[in-house]
Amino acid sequence: MAQHHWKDLMVWKKSHQLAIDIYSITNSFPETERFNLISQIRRAGTSIPTNIVEGHDRSSTNDFLRFLYISRGSLEEVRYLFLLSKDLQFIEDKLYQDIENKCIEVSILLNKLINSLK
């Protein structure tokens, strides 16, 4: 199915960087959120590139698409959790907008890849 390595996919590169950014940003969250919001946002954030990787190695396009849809769902979860984080005043508006812009970029790339495989 896929000829290239998953590391060659721009959507993987951008989602991998997003996951790294999520870890960096959540390091400043309150310690009381370690097992709640921090854990949930990190799991959702790493799920985005992880599902791209797992789906890329599947034997069919339909399997790959299924994993890309899961990745897209995780991305939307991250977007909500950052909105919640902003509203709880764990992050400032500017940082929220920066991460939201990165999420939008990943979303556009995911949608393009999904549409190209349909």
Image (tube, grey):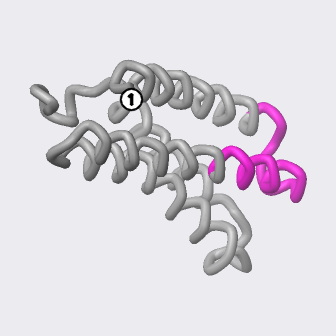
Q: Would residue 84 be counted in the magenta stretch?
A: yes
Residue 72 point in image, percent of width and height: 53, 42
Residue 44 quadrant: bottom right
Residue at figure coordinates x 28%, y 27% from the top left: 9
User: Label 1: which residue?
Assistant: 11
For the N terminus, give its image quadrant: top left
Q: Which residues are magenta?
A: 78-94
Residue 118 quadrant: top left
Q: Residue furthest left?
A: 3
Residue 25 point in image, percent of width and height: 60, 50
In the rendered image, the vertical position of residue 8 relative to residue 24, given as above or below:
above
Question: Dot 1, crowdedness within 10 Å: few (<14), some or many (≥20)?
Answer: many
Residue at figure coordinates x 79%, y 47% from the top left: 83
Task: Using residue 45 as the reference point, say whether residue 97 is left or right of it.
Answer: right
Residue at figure coordinates x 64%, y 35% from the top left: 99
Residue at figure coordinates x 38%, y 29% from the top left: 11
Task: Using residue 73 as the reference point, say whether residue 11 is left or right of it.
Answer: left
Q: Would residue 70 be counted in the magenta stretch?
A: no
In the rendered image, the vertical position of residue 106 relative to residue 69, given as above or below:
above
Numbered label tally: 1
Task: Using residue 113 as the reference point, say whether residue 102 is left or right of it.
Answer: right
Element marked by disc 1: helix
Task: Using residue 88 as the reference point, say whether residue 16 is left or right of it.
Answer: left
Residue 14 point in image, percent of width and height: 42, 31
Majority SS type along the magenta span? helix
Residue 112 point in image, percent of width and height: 45, 20
Amino acid carrying mark 1 in the image: Val
